Amino acid sequence: MTILKKKLDANQYNLKDQVVAINRVTKVVKGGKNMSFAALVVVGDAASGVVGYGSGKAKEVPQAIRKGIESAKKNLFRINLTDTTIPHQVLGRYGSGQVLLKPAPEGTGVIAGGAVRAVMTSAGVQNVLTKSLGSPNPHNVVKATFDALVQLRDRAEVANMRGKTVEEM
């Protein structure tokens, strides 16, 4: 099943950026070593449940972060949320990274590691339990988290798919 997502305009949201990881990359060439930096950035508007990620590479850290933010603004997703948590448990996968997301009662907070926490707080999820399984690589963990968030369905959508009303669910 392919998921059709419409392009979200980054200018209509109040996006906050968060740097997840900065990596120093070295390319060995004839004249020596060329240093550059790679940045993984998550941007999101907590009020409207919109979040995206991107990566940028440049000779210096600020330019790499700036490129990552621009890249993240180009692939924004809208997340289905119920009040302050997620509607149901979900497992996201990317490569060997897996992320398990569980809904949590009010007052629990975001129980998550670094990369998953950045995505959850940017998306506006206030109460969630998470477990990162498999690869600890921040790129794979962020992509697995996004895979999980894209799988979230709200009650109306599930009822419509099953041909029932929301009250019957």
Image (tube, rainbow, N blue to C red):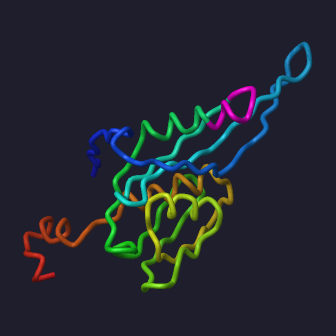
Instruction: Report the quarter where the C terminus lies.
Output: bottom left
> From this viewpoint, which residue is outermost toward the right?
32
Tell me what residue is drawn at x 38 percent, y 53 percent: 50
**Looking at the picture, how far across and down is residue 103, in whole percent?**
42, 78
> From this viewpoint, which residue is outermost toward the top?
31
In which image quadrant can residue 68 be found? top right
Q: Is residue 132 above or below residue 77?
A: below
Q: Which sits in the foreground, 130 or 121?
A: 121
> From this viewpoint, which residue is outermost toward the front?
14
Residue 64: in magenta span: yes
- The number of discs equals 0
**Looking at the picture, how far across and down is residue 16, in whole percent?**
51, 50
Provide the major secondary structure of the magenta segment. helix
Q: Which residues are magenta?
A: 58-65
Tell me what residue is drawn at x 29 percent, y 49 percent: 3
**Looking at the picture, how far across and down is residue 152, in whole percent?**
34, 65
**Looking at the picture, how far across and down is residue 153, in whole percent?**
28, 66
Residue 76: in magenta span: no
